[in-house]
Image (tube, rainbow, N blue to C red):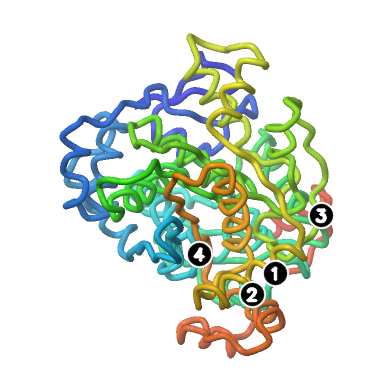
Amino acid sequence: MHLYSTKNRDLQVDLKEAVFRGLPEDNGLYMPNEIPRLPDSFFAQLPELSMPEIGFAVCEALFQGAIPAADLHHIIDEAINFPAPLVYLNPRQSVLELFHGPSLAFKDFGARFMAQLMSYFNRGEDQELTILVATSGDTGGAVAAGFYQTPGIRVVILYPSGKVSPLQEKQLTTLGHNITALEIEGTFDDCQALVKQAFLDQELRGKLRISSANSINISRLIPQSFYYFEAYKQLPKEGDPVVFAIPSGNFGNLTAGLLAYQMGLPVHQFIAATNANDVVPAYLQAGTYHPRPSVPTLSNAMDVGNPSNFARMVDLFAVAKGKGIDTDKGIWEGMKNKISGYAYTDEATEKAVVAVKEKYDYTIDPHGAIGYLALEAYQKANPHTRGIILETAHPAKFKEDMDRILGHEIEVPARLQALSNRTKTATLLQKNYAGFLNWIEKNLF
Ligand SMILES: *Cc1c(COP(=O)(O)O)cnc(C)c1O
């Protein structure tokens, strides 16, 4: 398997290098050179396949022998060891629950797969590998759980101080062992900028083996495509066209859906649902892209002002439309035909949480609620569709807000409950790179 940089198609690396590098040196993003269509036989068998079997078929097609079958089975079986059930709100709308993993968010899929893949590729290395990861909330917990006690790998998590929920914070600051948390006085974008800068710092990279665990890492993205097939397989075979509503921040999840689509999954439309950080819906509307600083919202895991996967989305539509790079206008037209964008305020989000509870007796978290609103809006204009909302996190991860919005205490799963008694360990840092570098030198060398 070969992967290229979105900034330069000629800059090609193999899977191992893409996974460890995270980011190409030209600051683009890695994309698979070939995204093969899965054979008809795969789609014919789909209803009988387990999610790990789906994952195996996807990876086998993408990896093209980069990992022997037996090892690949092992990696996928270890990573994808929890379900993704589809729960119906009504005959036209269902919720794909992606929160049954250890950190109770969809990011468990990517983080666990990446941990397994890195651990596989890291066999035989003698220098320790350091994973740097910026989180706006859920990535950190998933990565921490995914890599916890993985030999030869340590994880440094940067999170914005005061901008993650108390339970999220516990998930990233209480494990210890090979997991270290840095509390940054800034926003998620500041955390992401620090990580990006470290990756571009050639002097640092000469001394430290570092890798990324953000959604920019291709190994995070690939397993997120599995559950689009998994959702589809749970629907009745016959019926209206299928659309996915995806609560989005960095747009990794949506990009993974596009990957599944390119591999042949018959997705009629993608619905990009955001909070006030609506850079992508605004682009779909106007055709020009204007990243800007993020603003804090209720759905904090989507507070992203400059979504890193946008470059991949552009690339997918450029490639899909022709050979090499298309015109900006062509890319935009392709994208807005396949992706509908909607953005919602916190006020609307809260109302949606209440409405879903009242109408369907289903407790949806604030991120999923934005997906619900976007699906509602889309289906108003396109009623003859079957909509799947990606429920990206368990509502109990946002308990304080959920209790306030619903006016009663929501149930907390036992494994999350146990966390609240554990002690937080984190180092507070300013958002400047010099201070971060200083910390690295003192603690990681
Ligand atoms: C990360 C996250 C998102 C956004 O996902 P992207 O792939 O970054 O678009 C949405 N909801 C929750 C709960 C998340 O943790």
Mark 3 Cα within 10 Å, few/some/many (few <14, many 20+)? some
Please state the horizontal and vertical placement of residue 179, each as a whole percent of the image: 55, 66
The tag earlier along the polypeptide, 3 or 2, is 3
As helix, strand or loop, the secondary structure at mark 3 comes to loop
Q: Earlier in the sequence, mark 3 or mark 1?
A: 3
Q: Is mark 4 within 8 Å of ligand 1?
A: yes
Residue for badge 4? 105
Q: Are marks 4 and 3 in contact (CB under 8 Å)?
A: no
Separation of residues labelled 1 and 4 (CA atoms): 22 Å
Q: Which mark is residue 351?
A: 1
Q: Residue at x 67, y 55 (%)?
A: 302
- Assess whether mark 2 and mark 1 are in contact (beta carbons under 8 angstroms): yes
Question: Does dot 2 land on a helix, a strand or a loop?
Answer: helix
Circle 2 residue? 354
Q: Of callouts 1 and 4, which one flags the residue occurring earlier in the amino acid sequence? A: 4
Q: Is residue 20 visible?
A: no
Give the residue at x 16% y 52%.
Answer: 48
Sequence-first disc among 2 and 4 = 4
Residue named by callout 3: 295
State left or right for residue 97 relative to residue 277. left
